[in-house]
Amino acid sequence: MGVHALEVDWNVKKYEENGGTQTNNFQQYHNKRVRVVFESRWTNQWRTTLAYIKATAGNCTGSNASCDTKGDGRDPDERRA
């Protein structure tokens, strides 16, 4: 009964910038993210979707100052139904 789909996405982001200035000291940033989505189509009128998303705070380097991506110390995640 119904049609079901499972999707899993995983990515690693890495950004680099050269020539940082006093106001723009960013040199490098990277983090990881995963997303899992499950969708069920029970009938033409009824559907169910569950999603879970999690990303690491990542880390970065700066040319003139420290670079903090940790925020409050928690890695963000999100759950949806």
Image (tube, grey):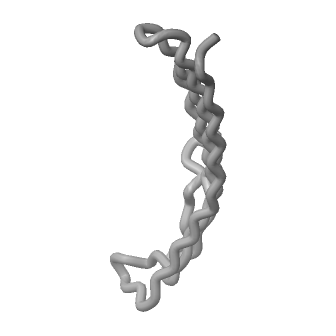
Q: Is residue 45 above or below residue 74?
A: above
Q: Residue furthest front?
A: 1
Q: Is residue 70 above or below residue 52?
A: below
* Residue under the image location 58 percent in, 41 percent down: 72
Quarter of image, res 2: top right
Residue 73 visible somewhere in the drawing = no
Q: Is residue 43 above or below residue 59?
A: above
Q: Nearer the viewer, residue 81 or 29?
A: 81
* Residue under the image location 57 percent in, 64 percent down: 13
Quarter of image, res 53: top right
Q: Is residue 39 above or below residue 66?
A: above
x, y percent for residue 31: 62, 59
Q: Nearer the viewer, residue 46 or 21?
A: 46
x, y percent for residue 11: 62, 57
Could you tell whether 22 is left or right of 39 in the image? left
| Quarter of the rendering occupied by the N terminus | top right
x, y percent for residue 40: 57, 19
x, y percent for residue 62: 53, 77
Could you tell whether 44 is left or right of 73 in the image? left
